Image (tube, helix red, strand yellow):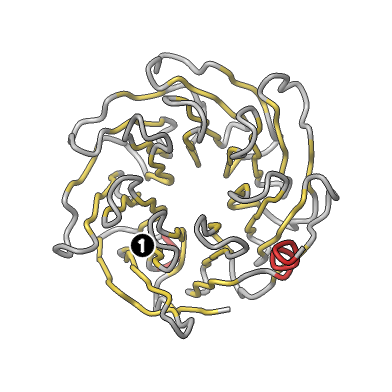
């Protein structure tokens, strides 16, 4: 395991570059996101497996999420507590090359479209909406109303162009066609609690996982969403982020307010196959490395970023 300390900054989101598996960005905030500014850290894994700072970018409000461009290895987008998104070029000036500001409340999630036929950004906000952006334009392309409470997460489908999912404090999962913003194509209740995270399975276009504030992770088949196809138990507090592995269809990772990072196999057990406790505060950020099988990163409110290979994933690689 290699680690990095973000002094006086609390980690919210960590992402591996889709172009270089040794490059990482981390979105952080001062004062647990309640006040103060935010810092975007660009980190690099060195040949001796140290994690070092390659760049640092300041913003006057807290940063809650970050995502890499899928077409330019130097571009990332962050989401901020001041209702805006920032497009950064990590190799240019320490100021955003573009700022997008239309939301009325905190922006909590950003995502870049996964299919090569389109290059679009999603933002999910506490103003109960999702917005669609072209990174080359300052004005949004569309606004998606419908959730009755704040929207925590919106994620593009890795399979279907213009399709994305959103989850909210209203307990629902909604699936949208980006060309039809008037109403969701599918909407159904997934938790009797706030839903903080969702993730599409790379190997099944109809399968999504959701993580709730009651500590449950559930799986849903969009062809028959009347009941979950799996339910994973063990997190003592809210599941802050859940993510399917990009390498194996049955594997999931999660991070929680119970200070843990967990690995799950939906074909094996409703309990985690590994629980990692190397944070001393809420764990907020999680990402699988698309280019290094078995490696993940997490970050939390203890100001630590870890890059590591859980033993449960290493064991599978060796089989």
The quadrant the N terminus occupies is: bottom right
The quarter of the rendered structure image containing the C terminus is bottom right
Residue at screen point 64% across, 22% down? 188
Quadrant location of residue 130?
top left
Where does residue 83 sit, x and y in percent of width and height?
31, 44
310 left or right of 183 in image = right
Residue at the image point whose x is 69% and y is 72% from the top: 277
Q: Which residue is mark 1?
A: 35
Rendered location of residue 144, percent (x, y): 40, 24
Front residue of 138/266: it is 266
Residue lying at the far right in this picture: please name it. 269
- Residue at the limit of the structure toward the left, as seen here: 93
- Residue count near mark 1 (Cα–Cα under 10 Å), binned few <14, some 14–19, many ≥20: few
Which residue is nearer to you in this view: 12 or 66?
66
Q: Position of residue 18 (x, y in %)?
A: 41, 54
Q: Secondary structure at mark 1?
A: loop
Q: Is residue 83 above or below residue 33?
A: above
**Looking at this view, is 244 or 106 the one in front?**
244
297 vs 184: above or below? below
Residue 3: % across, % down: 51, 79
> Quarter of the image holding residue 173?
top right
Outermost front residue? 319
Q: Residue 166, relative to residue 99: is it above or below?
A: above
Comparing 54 with 149, the one in front is: 54
Q: Is residue 223 above or below residue 209?
A: above
Image label count:
1
**Left or right relative to 101: residue 35:** right
């Amino acid at each position: 395991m290699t680690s990095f300390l973000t002094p006086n900054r609390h980690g919210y989101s960590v992402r591996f570059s889709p172009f270089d598996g040794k490059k990482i960005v981390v979105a952080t905030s001062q004062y647990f996101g309640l006040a103060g500014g935010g810092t975007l850290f660009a980190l690099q894994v060195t040949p001796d497996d140290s994690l070092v700072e390659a760049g640092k970018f300041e913003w006057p409000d807290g940063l809650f999420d970050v995502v890499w461009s899928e077409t330019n290895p130097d571009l990332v987008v962050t989401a901020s507590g001041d209702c805006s998104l920032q497009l950064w070029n990590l190799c240019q000036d320490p100021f955003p090359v573009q700022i997008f500001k239309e939301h009325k409340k905190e922006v909590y999630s950003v995502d870049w479209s996964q299919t090569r036929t389109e290059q679009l950004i999603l933002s999910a906000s506490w103003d109960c909406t999702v917005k669609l952006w072209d990174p080359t334009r300052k004005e949004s392309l569309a606004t998606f109303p419908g959730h009755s409470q704040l929207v925590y997460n919106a994620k593009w489908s890795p399979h279907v162009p213009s399709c994305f999912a959103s989850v909210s404090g209203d307990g629902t999962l909604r699936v949208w066609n980006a060309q039809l913003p008037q109403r969701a194509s599918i909407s159904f209740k997934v938790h009797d609690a706030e839903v903080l995270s969702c993730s599409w399975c790379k190997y099944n276009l109809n399968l999504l996982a959701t993580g709730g504030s009651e500590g449950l992770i559930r799986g849903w088949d969009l062809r028959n969403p009347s009941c979950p196809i799996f339910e994973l138990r063990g997190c003592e507090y809210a599941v802050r982020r859940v993510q399917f592995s990009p390498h194996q269809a049955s594997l999931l990772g999660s991070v929680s307010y119970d200070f843990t990072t967990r690995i799950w196999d939906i074909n094996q057990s409703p309990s985690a196959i590994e629980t990692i406790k190397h944070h001393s505060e809420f764990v907020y950020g999680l990402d699988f490395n698309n280019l290094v099988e078995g490696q993940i990163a997490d970050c939390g409110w203890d100001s630590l970023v870890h890059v590591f290979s859980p033993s449960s994933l290493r064991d599978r690689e060796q089989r």
